[in-house]
Image (cartoon, rainbow, N blue to C red):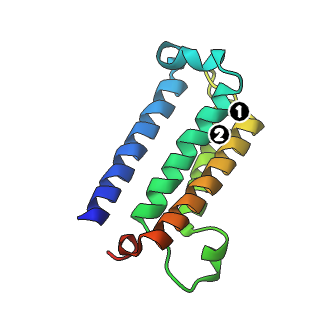
């Protein structure tokens, strides 16, 4: 039951995240989150918050396989998210309503790291989350 709730939350957040990207790609972002521009570094904090939440939920929903060398640094889930988010940031160079920003990508990287780190702490603290 607990695992299913986490997976449902991850799926819901992935859907929400995709909707945000679609809104931004259409150039309608200012209608929804114009207030972000009035906050210093609001865009970067937005990237950090969204990607850390995404990484946290996805890493909790799909726990790493124990015993692999990769999980000491990055989980497979985080690496997949890194590739997808990097491609999404690069694609913004070809979308007129968007701008490809290296610092947005750095905020995404920080968010992925924070989300994975938080998920690993929660998994250690609540061992029942590790079991399917």
Q: Is residue 13 left or right of residue 68?
A: left
Q: Residue furthest right?
A: 102
Name above or below for residue 88 compared with residue 9: above
Query: Does residue 20 appear in this view?
Result: yes
Label 2: element kind: helix
Q: Are marks 1 and 2 in contact (CB under 8 Å)?
A: yes
* Residue occupying image coordinates x 56% and y 48%: 52
Q: Is residue 102 left or right of residue 80?
A: right
* Residue occupying image coordinates x 28% and y 57%: 5
Q: Residue 30, image x and y in percent?
A: 54, 15
Name above or below for residue 115 compared with residue 51: below
Determine the image quadrant of residue 78. bottom right
Q: Residue 69, image x and y in percent?
A: 64, 82
* Residue occupying image coordinates x 47% and y 70%: 125
Q: Residue furthest left?
A: 1
Residue 89 has which mark? 2
- Check disc 1 and report the residue beneath it: 100
Which quarter of the image is occupied by the C terminus? Answer: bottom left
**Disc 1: CA contacts within 10 A as few (<14), some (14-19) or many (>=20):** some
Q: Residue 76, image x and y in percent?
A: 55, 68
């Amino acid at each position: 039951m607990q695992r299913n709730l986490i997976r449902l939350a991850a799926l819901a957040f992935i859907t929400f995240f995709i909707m945000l990207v679609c809104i931004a790609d259409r150039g309608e972002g200012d209608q929804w989150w114009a207030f972000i521009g009035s906050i210093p570094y609001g865009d970067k904090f937005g990237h950090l918050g969204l990607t850390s939440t995404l990484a946290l939920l996805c890493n909790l929903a799909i726990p790493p396989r124990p015993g692999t060398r990769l999980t000491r640094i990055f989980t497979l889930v985080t690496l997949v998210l890194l590739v997808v988010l990097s491609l999404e940031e690069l694609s913004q160079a070809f979308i007129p309503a968007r701008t490809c920003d290296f610092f947005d990508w750095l905020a995404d990287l920080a968010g992925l790291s924070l989300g994975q780190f938080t998920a690993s702490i929660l998994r250690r603290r609540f061992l029942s989350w590790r079991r399917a």
